[in-house]
Image (tube, helix red, strand yellow):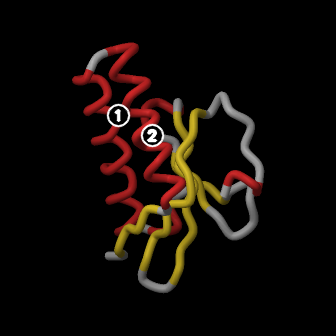
Amino acid sequence: MLNILWSERALRRRIEIYVAVAEYAGVQSADYYMSEFDRVLDLAAANPKMGKIGIVPHTRELYPVKHKYRIVYKIQQDTIFVLTVKSCRQLHTAQDC
């Protein structure tokens, strides 16, 4: 099982998503979203190549919460390095990583 390491950008985005969901749908919904992020990353830690091959070279992508969000990560030795988390409605480019 691989370790999971979040970049500063990914952590910042996670907090922004939490706040936005909490304001819109309540804290319980925001907690659910965060638990889904963690759940799919835990699955990826056990199966690192389970994520779809990413748009950005050398990355993989997971789509938790019914494909509302994109978690972009890369595999580095024994670690899954989370590069960013974003809404699937947002344009995604290499500069986001």
Q: What amino acid type should be assigned to the residue bearing mark 2? A: Pro
Residue appearing at x 57%, y 68% in the figure: 74
- In this rendering, the answer to whether 87 lies above or below 27 is below
Nearest the camera: 42 or 34?
A: 34
Instruction: Return the residue found at the far top.
Output: 24
Residue appearing at x 43%, y 43% in the figure: 14
Nearest the camera: 6 or 36?
A: 6
Percent x, y of residue 75: 53, 74
Q: Are marks 2 and 1 in contact (CB under 8 Å)?
A: yes
> Which numbered disc, 2 or 1, marks the residue closer to the eye?
1
- In this rendering, the answer to whether 40 lies above or below 7 is above
Pointer 1 residue: 33
Mark 2: which secondary structure?
helix
- In this rendering, the answer to whether 22 lies above or below 48 is above
Left or right of residue 11: residue 71: right
Pointer 2 residue: 64
Labels 2 and 1: the sequence-earlier one: 1
Mark 1: which secondary structure?
helix
Percent x, y of residue 48: 47, 69
Percent x, y of residue 46: 35, 69
Left or right of residue 15: residue 70: right
Q: How many marks?
A: 2
